[in-house]
Image (cartoon, rainbow, N blue to C red):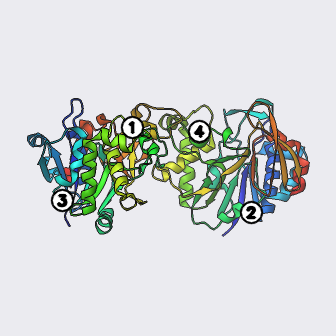
Amino acid sequence: MTRGILIYAHNNRTVDYALMAIISGGLAKKNLQVPVSLITDISTVEWMKESNIFNHATDIFEHIITVDRPATANQRHLNDGQTGQMVPFINTNRNTACDLTPYDRTLLIDSDFFVLSNSLGEYWDIDIDVMLGDAINDIYNDSRTGYLDRHVSDTGVKMYWATTVMFSKNSNAKLFFDTVNYIKENYSQFADVFRFDPRQFRNDIAFSIAKHILDGYRQTDIGSLPPVLSALDKDILHGVNGNTLTFLVDYKFTNSYCAAAISDIDVHIMNKQSVIRHKQALLELI
Amino acid sequence: MNFGYLIVVAEHDSVDYLQLAYGLALSIKNTQQQGYDRVAIVIDDKTKIEKLTSPWVFDHVIEWSQETFWDGRSWMDQLTPFDHTVCLDADMLFVQDHSHWIDYFIDNSELYVANQVFTYRGDTVSDRSYRKAFDKNNLPDLYSMWTFFNKDSQMAKEFFDLGRSIIKNPIEFSNTFLHQHKPKVLGTDEAFALSADILGITDEIAYALDFPRIVHMKPMLQKWPWPADTWSDHVGFYLNKKGQLKIGNYQQYDIIHYVEKDKINKEMINNLEEIAWKL
């Protein structure tokens, strides 16, 4: 049975997701000791060549799979510490992962998720077809996460985090990803039934509802990956020193910062620009 | 084995408790195995039962009017026609078979009172808005809506005798035992909890078990991010023609205590009747 990691990256004019995927893929490959493949589009590949990072990509990725760039009207406000801007968010094709993965057992991760440990390696052999990140764990503490980080709506279902998804390439996982696609294509109708805000498509919501439906419209303890430790986009990656990452954490969302550090633990860094600023140090970790 | 469910209904100005009990009895007939599906009802006037479309769902009809409203439930041990009984509140529904658990209680227990409840999402209820008297007075967290007892049990007899005394003498018992927080109404839950506490039998009648799992629909228990007066303002209640129940986005698999008495309307009764007629 083949195992591997899959990352999606579609650049926009503001965020170099390809570079993020190279860093994320390189760290995952190093720490989980399995191959990594990239799903991207022709224009992102052209950008990688133009910006001289394509040789990194070919070193790290076992397969670079090009697909049509998904059309999206998704816009998202991305913070970079105290500043921020609206950027297009091209992320609506994760439902294709089961069809496109070259592996029998796949760990699908976001390009801003950085594997610095082997903890997810413990899940390869678990006999569950689809597993999702159980929750978000804030790098500071629970005071910065809200009810809607844990539920898709006030009265609705539990929110899982599609930042990490492990699945087997089989009919059950295919059904799961087809359900995600159905929810995506009927997002407004599902928003009426599950009471979430439909204005921006979120993989976390589509994946959570698909799991809820396929679990028999109930919450189960089955199919969870560890909670996703996350530095929010108001936080700033400050330094990279070996496997230790230091952050400035906006601990009250009042532009008041405190320092935090993590070592040898997987982390989701939502402030993408601060990752890009440390690309050299992060690439040296690989 | 002589086992059955007991439902005590009372006359009320605005709530048709007989209709609620009828819905519950239908749901028991529809879901529990033969031998575990008998239902007795205690009512002040037997002739009311004859007006139901399917009065046969009640295997025993006991005419009794000694007490009013919920005080009648504290007489469950003397009213039941069964050797082994689970006494239920009328505003409950069964949606799947739990018969195997009844064997467990008959074999292992003389008296057992539900002691944890769940939200419609399946989370264990942690909110204490309705349980201040329990917490302040260190009473065991009992829910009388599901009470199993063996009619021959001396412990059950003492428990119910004391429970009745408490309900009959609420001021005296409150002054003596509930001085940290006196409840406005000393109801069956408080009386049972105090009875268990005074007799020192809590560990014998309310130990941790995976059953009964009861979804308690009091609105403040639902772990919503805001206070709520009425749960049906926020989530739907969908009982289909197969007797399957969804609350909000959640399929229900446990015993439901729906609290809002208007939830069982004639259409739902009709759905439950049609299932029962096909059995």
Type of amino acid under label 3: Phe
* Residue at figure coordinates x 35%, y 47% from the top left: B256
Residue topped by disc 4: A147
Distance from Cα at disc 2 to Cα at disc 3: 59 Å
Q: Helix or strand or loop: what does disc 1 sit on?
A: loop
Mark in front: 1 vs 4: 1
Q: Residues within 10 Å of mark 1 (few under 14, many from 20)?
A: some
Distance from Cα at disc 1 to Cα at disc 3: 35 Å
Res B207 → quadrant: bottom left
Name the foreground residue: A34 vs B268.
B268
Q: Are marks 2 and 3 in contact (CB under 8 Å)?
A: no
Q: Helix or strand or loop: what does disc 4 sit on?
A: helix
Q: Residues within 10 Å of mark 3 (few under 14, many from 20)?
A: many
Labels 1 and 2 positioned on one and the same chain: no
Type of amino acid under label 2: Asn
Residue topped by disc 2: A118
Q: Chain of mark 2?
A: A
Residue topped by disc 3: B82
Q: Earlier in the sequence, mark 4 or mark 2?
A: 2
User: Left of A274 or right of it: where is B73?
Assistant: left
Q: Residues within 10 Å of mark 4 (few under 14, many from 20)?
A: few
Q: Chain of mark 4?
A: A
Labels 4 and 3 positioned on one and the same chain: no
Q: Helix or strand or loop: what does disc 3 sit on?
A: loop
Distance from Cα at disc 1 to Cα at disc 4: 34 Å
Residue topped by disc 1: B182
Q: Position of residue A223 (x, y in %)?
A: 57, 57
Q: Helix or strand or loop: what does disc 2 sit on?
A: loop
Res B51 → quadrant: top left
